[in-house]
Image (cartoon, helix red, strand yellow):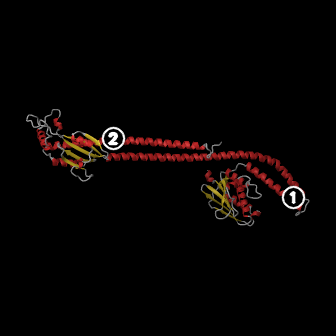
Amino acid sequence: MSDTPTSPLAEPKSRLTGLLLVGVLLLILAVIGVTTARRMQSTGQLMRHALATQGELVIKSLEGATRFGMRHHMWGSLRMQSLVEEMLRLPSLDSLAVIGSRGEVLAAGVAASQVADVPGRALTGLPSQVQQAMDKRLPVIQFLGKELVVGRPFEPLAPFRRQGRSMPPWARSMDDHMRRMMGPPPDRPGNGSPDSPPPTPKPGYVLVRLSTASIHAAQARDLASSLILAGVVFFSTGALAAAMFLYARRRQGELARLREEVAENQHLAAVGRLAGSVAHEVRNPLSALRGLVQFLAKGHEPGTRSYQCAETAVAEVDRLERVVSGLLDYTRPRSPRLISMDLDESIAGTLRLLSDEPRSQGVEIISRLADDLPLVKADPDQVRQIIMNLLINALEANNGSGQVTVSARRHGRHVWVEVSDQGPGLPSGNSEELFDPFFSTKERGTGLGLAIARRLARGMGGDLIAGSAVEQSGARFILTLIPDEARA
Protein backbone atom coordinates (compact mmCIF):
# COMPACT_ATOMS: atom_id res chain seq x y z
CA MET A 1 0.00 0.00 0.00
CA SER A 2 1.41 3.41 -0.93
CA ASP A 3 1.77 6.03 1.81
CA THR A 4 -0.27 8.77 0.11
CA PRO A 5 -1.58 11.83 2.01
CA THR A 6 -4.95 10.14 2.32
CA SER A 7 -3.47 6.81 3.33
CA PRO A 8 -4.00 5.68 6.93
CA LEU A 9 -0.24 5.17 7.17
CA ALA A 10 0.32 8.92 6.81
CA GLU A 11 -2.09 9.85 9.61
CA PRO A 12 -0.15 8.23 12.50
CA LYS A 13 3.04 9.95 11.34
CA SER A 14 1.35 13.35 11.26
CA ARG A 15 -0.32 12.66 14.60
CA LEU A 16 2.99 11.56 16.15
CA THR A 17 4.72 14.70 14.87
CA GLY A 18 1.92 16.86 16.29
CA LEU A 19 2.09 15.09 19.66
CA LEU A 20 5.87 15.57 19.78
CA LEU A 21 5.51 19.29 19.06
CA VAL A 22 2.79 19.65 21.70
CA GLY A 23 4.92 17.72 24.19
CA VAL A 24 7.97 19.90 23.55
CA LEU A 25 5.84 23.04 23.84
CA LEU A 26 4.32 21.88 27.14
CA LEU A 27 7.76 20.97 28.47
CA ILE A 28 9.13 24.42 27.58
CA LEU A 29 6.12 26.13 29.14
CA ALA A 30 6.48 23.99 32.27
CA VAL A 31 10.16 24.94 32.58
CA ILE A 32 9.27 28.61 32.12
CA GLY A 33 6.51 28.28 34.74
CA VAL A 34 8.76 26.61 37.32
CA THR A 35 11.55 29.10 36.66
CA THR A 36 9.12 32.00 36.97
CA ALA A 37 7.72 30.68 40.26
CA ARG A 38 11.21 30.29 41.70
CA ARG A 39 12.28 33.71 40.52
CA MET A 40 9.16 35.32 41.97
CA GLN A 41 9.72 33.50 45.27
CA SER A 42 13.37 34.55 45.36
CA THR A 43 12.44 38.14 44.48
CA GLY A 44 9.84 38.17 47.27
CA GLN A 45 12.31 36.83 49.82
CA LEU A 46 15.02 39.32 48.86
CA MET A 47 12.68 42.27 48.92
CA ARG A 48 11.08 41.22 52.22
CA HIS A 49 14.59 41.00 53.69
CA ALA A 50 15.34 44.45 52.27
CA LEU A 51 12.14 45.88 53.75
CA ALA A 52 12.88 44.26 57.13
CA THR A 53 16.37 45.79 57.05
CA GLN A 54 14.81 49.15 56.18
CA GLY A 55 12.47 48.83 59.17
CA GLU A 56 15.39 48.05 61.48
CA LEU A 57 17.29 51.04 60.10
CA VAL A 58 14.27 53.28 60.72
CA ILE A 59 14.16 52.16 64.37
CA LYS A 60 17.92 52.61 64.80
CA SER A 61 17.71 56.04 63.16
CA LEU A 62 14.87 56.99 65.51
CA GLU A 63 16.93 55.90 68.52
CA GLY A 64 19.98 57.77 67.23
CA ALA A 65 17.98 60.94 66.65
CA THR A 66 16.50 60.59 70.17
CA ARG A 67 19.99 60.31 71.71
CA PHE A 68 21.10 63.36 69.77
CA GLY A 69 18.14 65.33 71.09
CA MET A 70 18.80 64.14 74.62
CA ARG A 71 22.42 65.17 74.41
CA HIS A 72 21.42 68.69 73.43
CA HIS A 73 18.42 68.84 75.77
CA MET A 74 15.93 68.97 72.87
CA TRP A 75 14.02 65.78 73.51
CA GLY A 76 10.30 65.66 74.07
CA SER A 77 6.99 64.38 72.77
CA LEU A 78 6.57 67.15 70.21
CA ARG A 79 10.05 66.68 68.86
CA MET A 80 9.45 62.92 68.75
CA GLN A 81 6.25 63.47 66.74
CA SER A 82 8.08 65.78 64.34
CA LEU A 83 10.82 63.18 63.90
CA VAL A 84 8.24 60.47 63.19
CA GLU A 85 6.51 62.64 60.59
CA GLU A 86 9.83 63.35 58.86
CA MET A 87 10.70 59.66 58.75
CA LEU A 88 7.34 58.89 57.13
CA ARG A 89 8.69 60.55 53.99
CA LEU A 90 10.89 57.51 53.40
CA PRO A 91 9.78 55.21 50.55
CA SER A 92 7.68 52.13 51.38
CA LEU A 93 7.02 53.44 54.90
CA ASP A 94 3.27 53.33 55.65
CA SER A 95 3.16 54.12 59.37
CA LEU A 96 5.37 54.54 62.44
CA ALA A 97 4.41 54.45 66.09
CA VAL A 98 6.39 54.92 69.34
CA ILE A 99 4.71 53.36 72.40
CA GLY A 100 5.48 54.09 76.05
CA SER A 101 5.96 51.58 78.86
CA ARG A 102 2.27 51.65 79.76
CA GLY A 103 1.14 51.18 76.14
CA GLU A 104 0.40 54.84 75.52
CA VAL A 105 1.25 56.26 72.10
CA LEU A 106 4.09 58.78 72.42
CA ALA A 107 4.27 59.58 68.72
CA ALA A 108 2.59 58.09 65.67
CA GLY A 109 1.77 58.87 62.08
CA VAL A 110 0.92 57.44 58.68
CA ALA A 111 2.40 58.23 55.28
CA ALA A 112 0.77 60.84 53.07
CA SER A 113 -0.08 58.11 50.54
CA GLN A 114 -2.32 56.43 53.10
CA VAL A 115 -5.63 57.57 54.57
CA ALA A 116 -5.81 60.68 56.70
CA ASP A 117 -3.81 60.54 59.90
CA VAL A 118 -6.12 59.44 62.69
CA PRO A 119 -4.88 58.90 66.24
CA GLY A 120 -4.13 55.24 66.71
CA ARG A 121 -4.36 54.52 62.96
CA ALA A 122 -0.77 53.16 62.96
CA LEU A 123 -1.77 50.46 65.51
CA THR A 124 -5.05 49.24 64.01
CA GLY A 125 -5.62 46.03 62.11
CA LEU A 126 -2.74 44.13 63.68
CA PRO A 127 -2.94 40.34 64.12
CA SER A 128 -2.85 38.77 67.58
CA GLN A 129 0.76 37.56 67.16
CA VAL A 130 1.98 41.11 66.69
CA GLN A 131 -0.14 42.39 69.59
CA GLN A 132 1.30 39.77 71.92
CA ALA A 133 4.87 40.61 70.84
CA MET A 134 4.17 44.29 71.50
CA ASP A 135 2.75 43.56 74.96
CA LYS A 136 5.78 41.42 75.84
CA ARG A 137 8.20 43.89 74.23
CA LEU A 138 9.58 41.19 71.92
CA PRO A 139 11.08 41.82 68.49
CA VAL A 140 8.78 40.89 65.62
CA ILE A 141 9.00 40.74 61.84
CA GLN A 142 5.66 39.71 60.35
CA PHE A 143 4.68 39.57 56.68
CA LEU A 144 0.97 40.36 56.32
CA GLY A 145 0.52 40.20 52.54
CA LYS A 146 0.13 43.89 51.72
CA GLU A 147 2.52 45.08 54.41
CA LEU A 148 5.53 44.05 56.48
CA VAL A 149 5.45 44.79 60.21
CA VAL A 150 8.74 45.34 62.04
CA GLY A 151 8.74 46.02 65.78
CA ARG A 152 11.17 45.93 68.67
CA PRO A 153 11.77 47.65 72.02
CA PHE A 154 12.62 51.35 71.86
CA GLU A 155 15.79 51.83 73.96
CA PRO A 156 17.82 54.86 72.86
CA LEU A 157 20.05 54.65 75.99
CA ALA A 158 20.68 50.91 75.72
CA PRO A 159 24.24 51.35 74.35
CA PHE A 160 25.25 53.02 77.66
CA ARG A 161 23.91 50.13 79.73
CA ARG A 162 25.97 47.41 78.06
CA GLN A 163 29.36 46.03 78.92
CA GLY A 164 29.47 47.81 82.25
CA ARG A 165 29.77 51.22 80.72
CA SER A 166 28.99 54.17 82.96
CA MET A 167 26.36 56.54 81.68
CA PRO A 168 27.42 60.16 81.08
CA PRO A 169 25.76 62.83 83.20
CA TRP A 170 23.41 63.95 80.42
CA ALA A 171 22.36 60.38 79.84
CA ARG A 172 21.69 59.78 83.57
CA SER A 173 19.53 62.87 83.75
CA MET A 174 17.67 61.92 80.61
CA ASP A 175 17.28 58.38 81.91
CA ASP A 176 15.58 59.74 85.00
CA HIS A 177 13.48 61.99 82.80
CA MET A 178 12.43 59.02 80.71
CA ARG A 179 11.56 57.03 83.82
CA ARG A 180 9.31 59.84 84.97
CA MET A 181 7.85 60.38 81.49
CA MET A 182 7.12 56.75 80.79
CA GLY A 183 5.84 56.19 84.33
CA PRO A 184 6.58 53.47 86.86
CA PRO A 185 6.11 49.88 85.91
CA PRO A 186 3.08 48.03 87.24
CA ASP A 187 3.08 47.32 91.03
CA ARG A 188 4.83 44.16 92.10
CA PRO A 189 5.90 42.79 95.46
CA GLY A 190 8.85 44.71 96.91
CA ASN A 191 8.18 47.91 95.00
CA GLY A 192 7.27 49.81 98.15
CA SER A 193 10.29 48.61 100.18
CA PRO A 194 12.70 51.46 100.87
CA ASP A 195 15.61 49.03 100.68
CA SER A 196 14.74 47.67 97.26
CA PRO A 197 16.61 49.08 94.26
CA PRO A 198 14.77 51.48 92.05
CA PRO A 199 12.69 49.55 89.54
CA THR A 200 13.77 49.47 85.89
CA PRO A 201 11.03 50.96 83.74
CA LYS A 202 9.42 48.79 81.10
CA PRO A 203 10.99 49.77 77.75
CA GLY A 204 9.06 51.53 75.09
CA TYR A 205 8.28 49.99 71.71
CA VAL A 206 8.52 51.06 68.09
CA LEU A 207 6.28 49.58 65.41
CA VAL A 208 7.09 50.16 61.74
CA ARG A 209 4.69 49.15 58.96
CA LEU A 210 6.09 49.03 55.44
CA SER A 211 4.19 48.61 52.18
CA THR A 212 4.94 45.50 50.13
CA ALA A 213 3.68 47.10 46.91
CA SER A 214 7.23 47.12 45.56
CA ILE A 215 7.42 43.35 46.10
CA HIS A 216 4.20 42.76 44.23
CA ALA A 217 5.29 45.13 41.47
CA ALA A 218 8.60 43.30 41.07
CA GLN A 219 6.83 39.93 41.03
CA ALA A 220 4.34 41.30 38.50
CA ARG A 221 7.24 42.38 36.29
CA ASP A 222 8.78 38.92 36.59
CA LEU A 223 5.43 37.36 35.71
CA ALA A 224 4.91 39.73 32.78
CA SER A 225 8.38 39.02 31.38
CA SER A 226 7.76 35.29 31.74
CA LEU A 227 4.39 35.58 30.01
CA ILE A 228 6.02 37.51 27.18
CA LEU A 229 8.71 34.84 26.92
CA ALA A 230 6.08 32.11 27.00
CA GLY A 231 4.10 33.94 24.32
CA VAL A 232 7.19 34.26 22.13
CA VAL A 233 7.97 30.57 22.64
CA PHE A 234 4.34 29.61 21.96
CA PHE A 235 4.04 31.66 18.80
CA SER A 236 7.52 30.62 17.63
CA THR A 237 6.65 27.00 18.18
CA GLY A 238 3.30 27.55 16.49
CA ALA A 239 5.01 29.18 13.51
CA LEU A 240 7.53 26.34 13.39
CA ALA A 241 4.74 23.78 13.60
CA ALA A 242 2.82 25.56 10.83
CA ALA A 243 5.94 25.69 8.66
CA MET A 244 6.62 22.02 9.30
CA PHE A 245 3.00 21.16 8.57
CA LEU A 246 3.01 23.11 5.31
CA TYR A 247 6.36 21.62 4.36
CA ALA A 248 5.07 18.12 5.14
CA ARG A 249 1.91 18.76 3.13
CA ARG A 250 3.99 20.03 0.26
CA ARG A 251 6.29 17.01 0.42
CA GLN A 252 3.30 14.69 0.62
CA GLY A 253 1.78 16.42 -2.39
CA GLU A 254 5.03 16.07 -4.31
CA LEU A 255 5.29 12.43 -3.34
CA ALA A 256 1.70 11.83 -4.38
CA ARG A 257 2.35 13.57 -7.70
CA LEU A 258 5.50 11.53 -8.25
CA ARG A 259 3.62 8.33 -7.44
CA GLU A 260 0.88 9.31 -9.87
CA GLU A 261 3.48 10.04 -12.54
CA VAL A 262 5.22 6.73 -11.90
CA ALA A 263 1.91 4.87 -12.04
CA GLU A 264 0.91 6.78 -15.16
CA ASN A 265 4.26 6.12 -16.80
CA GLN A 266 3.97 2.43 -15.98
CA HIS A 267 0.47 2.43 -17.42
CA LEU A 268 1.62 4.33 -20.48
CA ALA A 269 4.53 1.97 -20.92
CA ALA A 270 2.12 -0.95 -21.03
CA VAL A 271 -0.23 0.97 -23.33
CA GLY A 272 2.74 1.99 -25.45
CA ARG A 273 3.82 -1.59 -25.90
CA LEU A 274 0.25 -2.49 -26.81
CA ALA A 275 -0.02 0.50 -29.13
CA GLY A 276 3.20 -0.43 -30.84
CA SER A 277 1.91 -3.91 -31.45
CA VAL A 278 -1.43 -2.57 -32.68
CA ALA A 279 0.26 -0.03 -34.96
CA HIS A 280 2.53 -2.72 -36.37
CA GLU A 281 -0.32 -5.17 -36.91
CA VAL A 282 -3.00 -2.70 -38.02
CA ARG A 283 -1.29 0.09 -39.93
CA ASN A 284 -0.03 -1.99 -42.84
CA PRO A 285 -3.35 -3.84 -43.34
CA LEU A 286 -5.19 -0.50 -43.12
CA SER A 287 -2.98 1.00 -45.82
CA ALA A 288 -3.53 -2.05 -47.99
CA LEU A 289 -7.28 -1.95 -47.38
CA ARG A 290 -7.41 1.77 -48.24
CA GLY A 291 -5.56 1.21 -51.50
CA LEU A 292 -7.78 -1.73 -52.38
CA VAL A 293 -10.99 0.24 -51.75
CA GLN A 294 -9.71 3.16 -53.82
CA PHE A 295 -8.82 0.76 -56.64
CA LEU A 296 -12.26 -0.80 -56.59
CA ALA A 297 -13.90 2.63 -56.61
CA LYS A 298 -12.22 3.59 -59.88
CA GLY A 299 -14.66 1.47 -61.86
CA HIS A 300 -17.72 3.35 -60.60
CA GLU A 301 -19.08 6.74 -61.42
CA PRO A 302 -19.19 9.37 -58.67
CA GLY A 303 -22.59 9.53 -57.02
CA THR A 304 -23.37 5.86 -57.43
CA ARG A 305 -24.05 3.65 -54.46
CA SER A 306 -20.83 1.69 -54.92
CA TYR A 307 -18.77 4.89 -55.11
CA GLN A 308 -20.37 6.26 -51.92
CA CYS A 309 -19.64 3.01 -50.08
CA ALA A 310 -16.03 3.18 -51.22
CA GLU A 311 -15.74 6.78 -49.97
CA THR A 312 -17.21 5.77 -46.61
CA ALA A 313 -14.78 2.88 -46.33
CA VAL A 314 -11.83 5.16 -47.11
CA ALA A 315 -13.02 7.71 -44.49
CA GLU A 316 -13.35 5.01 -41.85
CA VAL A 317 -9.89 3.66 -42.66
CA ASP A 318 -8.49 7.19 -42.32
CA ARG A 319 -10.28 7.57 -38.96
CA LEU A 320 -8.78 4.32 -37.68
CA GLU A 321 -5.36 5.46 -38.79
CA ARG A 322 -5.82 8.75 -36.93
CA VAL A 323 -6.73 6.82 -33.79
CA VAL A 324 -3.62 4.68 -34.11
CA SER A 325 -1.45 7.74 -34.79
CA GLY A 326 -2.96 9.63 -31.83
CA LEU A 327 -2.42 6.68 -29.57
CA LEU A 328 1.23 6.49 -30.62
CA ASP A 329 1.65 10.25 -30.08
CA TYR A 330 0.18 9.97 -26.59
CA THR A 331 2.17 6.95 -25.48
CA ARG A 332 5.46 7.96 -27.11
CA PRO A 333 5.81 11.74 -26.63
CA ARG A 334 9.06 13.28 -27.71
CA SER A 335 11.04 15.54 -25.38
CA PRO A 336 10.29 19.24 -25.94
CA ARG A 337 12.88 21.48 -27.58
CA LEU A 338 12.74 24.48 -25.27
CA ILE A 339 13.76 27.79 -26.86
CA SER A 340 12.75 31.41 -26.43
CA MET A 341 9.75 31.98 -28.64
CA ASP A 342 7.27 34.73 -29.43
CA LEU A 343 3.67 33.75 -28.75
CA ASP A 344 2.37 36.51 -31.06
CA GLU A 345 3.97 34.88 -34.08
CA SER A 346 2.90 31.38 -33.06
CA ILE A 347 -0.75 32.37 -32.52
CA ALA A 348 -0.85 34.49 -35.69
CA GLY A 349 0.61 31.64 -37.76
CA THR A 350 -1.90 29.18 -36.35
CA LEU A 351 -4.80 31.53 -37.17
CA ARG A 352 -3.51 31.88 -40.75
CA LEU A 353 -3.51 28.10 -41.12
CA LEU A 354 -7.14 27.99 -40.00
CA SER A 355 -8.28 30.75 -42.35
CA ASP A 356 -9.23 28.22 -45.03
CA GLU A 357 -10.51 25.59 -42.60
CA PRO A 358 -14.12 24.70 -43.51
CA ARG A 359 -15.08 24.60 -39.87
CA SER A 360 -14.01 28.23 -39.44
CA GLN A 361 -16.45 29.49 -42.07
CA GLY A 362 -19.19 31.52 -40.39
CA VAL A 363 -17.28 31.77 -37.10
CA GLU A 364 -15.67 35.05 -36.03
CA ILE A 365 -12.22 34.47 -34.54
CA ILE A 366 -11.17 37.31 -32.24
CA SER A 367 -7.52 37.73 -31.21
CA ARG A 368 -6.71 39.66 -28.02
CA LEU A 369 -2.99 39.64 -27.39
CA ALA A 370 -1.43 41.86 -24.69
CA ASP A 371 1.13 44.43 -25.83
CA ASP A 372 3.61 43.54 -23.05
CA LEU A 373 3.56 39.82 -23.74
CA PRO A 374 6.99 38.41 -22.79
CA LEU A 375 8.92 35.68 -24.57
CA VAL A 376 8.28 32.18 -23.30
CA LYS A 377 10.54 29.16 -22.98
CA ALA A 378 8.74 26.44 -24.93
CA ASP A 379 8.76 24.17 -27.98
CA PRO A 380 7.27 26.14 -30.91
CA ASP A 381 5.97 23.04 -32.69
CA GLN A 382 4.27 21.68 -29.59
CA VAL A 383 2.79 25.08 -28.68
CA ARG A 384 1.35 25.40 -32.20
CA GLN A 385 -0.01 21.84 -31.97
CA ILE A 386 -1.75 22.63 -28.65
CA ILE A 387 -3.25 25.91 -29.88
CA MET A 388 -4.35 24.28 -33.13
CA ASN A 389 -6.09 21.50 -31.20
CA LEU A 390 -7.87 23.97 -28.91
CA LEU A 391 -8.99 26.16 -31.83
CA ILE A 392 -10.34 23.18 -33.80
CA ASN A 393 -12.28 22.01 -30.75
CA ALA A 394 -13.69 25.53 -30.30
CA LEU A 395 -14.72 25.76 -33.94
CA GLU A 396 -16.45 22.41 -33.75
CA ALA A 397 -18.23 23.49 -30.53
CA ASN A 398 -19.53 26.67 -32.26
CA ASN A 399 -20.84 24.61 -35.18
CA GLY A 400 -20.45 27.32 -37.82
CA SER A 401 -21.64 30.39 -35.87
CA GLY A 402 -20.74 32.67 -32.98
CA GLN A 403 -17.31 33.75 -31.83
CA VAL A 404 -14.08 32.09 -30.81
CA THR A 405 -11.75 34.26 -28.73
CA VAL A 406 -7.98 33.76 -28.48
CA SER A 407 -6.26 35.88 -25.82
CA ALA A 408 -2.77 35.92 -24.31
CA ARG A 409 -1.61 37.86 -21.27
CA ARG A 410 0.72 37.71 -18.31
CA HIS A 411 -0.88 36.23 -15.19
CA GLY A 412 1.35 36.26 -12.11
CA ARG A 413 4.48 34.22 -12.81
CA HIS A 414 3.00 32.61 -15.95
CA VAL A 415 1.71 33.53 -19.37
CA TRP A 416 -1.86 32.50 -20.14
CA VAL A 417 -3.10 31.59 -23.61
CA GLU A 418 -6.89 31.31 -23.42
CA VAL A 419 -9.23 29.90 -26.06
CA SER A 420 -12.97 30.30 -25.41
CA ASP A 421 -16.00 29.46 -27.51
CA GLN A 422 -19.77 29.98 -27.49
CA GLY A 423 -20.70 26.34 -27.75
CA PRO A 424 -22.71 24.15 -25.37
CA GLY A 425 -20.05 24.38 -22.65
CA LEU A 426 -18.38 21.72 -20.59
CA PRO A 427 -20.17 18.50 -19.70
CA SER A 428 -21.59 18.24 -16.22
CA GLY A 429 -19.34 16.59 -13.67
CA ASN A 430 -15.61 16.69 -13.27
CA SER A 431 -13.95 18.77 -15.98
CA GLU A 432 -10.73 16.80 -15.48
CA GLU A 433 -12.34 13.88 -17.28
CA LEU A 434 -11.87 15.82 -20.51
CA PHE A 435 -8.16 15.09 -20.32
CA ASP A 436 -8.56 11.36 -19.83
CA PRO A 437 -7.50 9.27 -22.83
CA PHE A 438 -10.40 8.12 -25.05
CA PHE A 439 -12.90 10.39 -23.22
CA SER A 440 -14.76 12.45 -25.82
CA THR A 441 -18.04 14.35 -26.05
CA LYS A 442 -17.95 14.18 -29.86
CA GLU A 443 -19.73 11.45 -31.69
CA ARG A 444 -16.70 10.51 -33.78
CA GLY A 445 -13.91 11.89 -31.56
CA THR A 446 -10.91 9.80 -30.53
CA GLY A 447 -10.63 11.34 -27.05
CA LEU A 448 -6.86 11.79 -27.38
CA GLY A 449 -6.53 15.42 -28.50
CA LEU A 450 -6.85 17.11 -25.09
CA ALA A 451 -4.91 14.32 -23.37
CA ILE A 452 -2.02 14.83 -25.79
CA ALA A 453 -2.25 18.62 -25.45
CA ARG A 454 -2.04 18.49 -21.65
CA ARG A 455 0.89 16.06 -21.78
CA LEU A 456 2.74 18.39 -24.13
CA ALA A 457 1.98 21.44 -21.93
CA ARG A 458 3.22 19.74 -18.76
CA GLY A 459 6.30 18.51 -20.57
CA MET A 460 7.23 22.18 -21.18
CA GLY A 461 6.68 23.07 -17.50
CA GLY A 462 3.20 24.53 -18.01
CA ASP A 463 -0.30 23.13 -17.81
CA LEU A 464 -3.65 22.98 -19.56
CA ILE A 465 -6.85 23.58 -17.59
CA ALA A 466 -10.53 23.73 -18.53
CA GLY A 467 -13.37 25.89 -17.26
CA SER A 468 -16.55 27.64 -18.22
CA ALA A 469 -16.40 30.87 -20.19
CA VAL A 470 -16.60 33.99 -18.04
CA GLU A 471 -18.29 36.58 -20.27
CA GLN A 472 -20.32 34.24 -22.46
CA SER A 473 -21.75 30.76 -22.59
CA GLY A 474 -19.43 28.02 -23.68
CA ALA A 475 -16.11 26.59 -22.56
CA ARG A 476 -12.61 27.95 -22.21
CA PHE A 477 -9.23 26.29 -22.10
CA ILE A 478 -6.14 27.96 -20.63
CA LEU A 479 -2.61 27.03 -21.62
CA THR A 480 -0.07 28.20 -19.01
CA LEU A 481 3.54 28.72 -20.04
CA ILE A 482 6.61 29.96 -18.18
CA PRO A 483 8.19 33.29 -19.29
CA ASP A 484 11.74 33.19 -20.52
CA GLU A 485 13.05 35.41 -17.68
CA ALA A 486 11.47 33.13 -15.07
CA ARG A 487 13.67 30.23 -16.18
CA ALA A 488 16.85 32.32 -16.22
Q: Marks 1 and 2, Cα distance to the nearest angstrom?
A: 110 Å
| Disc 2 residue type (three-letter) | Gln
Q: For the residues carrying marks 1 and 2, which lies nearer the camera in this image?
A: 2
Q: Residue 28: x and y, percent? A: 46, 42
Q: Residue 362: x and y, percent? A: 74, 67
Q: Which mark is residue 310?
A: 1
- Which residue is located at x 74 percent, y 53 percent? 438
Check disc 2 and report its element: helix, strand or loop.
helix
Query: Splitting the image into 4 quarters, where does residue 430 fall?
Result: bottom right
- Which residue is located at x 35 percent, y 40 percent? 42
- Which residue is located at x 65 percent, y 53 percent? 462
| Disc 1 residue type (three-letter) | Ala
Furthest-front residue in this view: 189
Please state which of residues 270 and 339 is positioned toward the viewer in this rendering.
Answer: 270
Q: Residues within 10 Å of mark 2 (few under 14, many from 20)?
A: few
Please state which of residues 414 and 188 is positioned toward the viewer in this rendering.
Answer: 188
User: In the rendered view of the protein, which quadrant contains the N terminus?
Assistant: top right
Residue that badge 2 annotates: 45
Q: Residues within 10 Å of mark 1 (few under 14, many from 20)?
A: many
Residue 360 placement, left or right of 407: right
Q: Which of disc 2 and disc 1 is earlier in sequence?
A: 2
Task: Judge whether residue 129 can be spotted in this image.
Answer: yes
Residue 265 placement, left or right of 228: right
Task: Judge whether residue 356 can be spotted in this image.
Answer: no
Q: Residue 30: x and y, percent? A: 44, 42
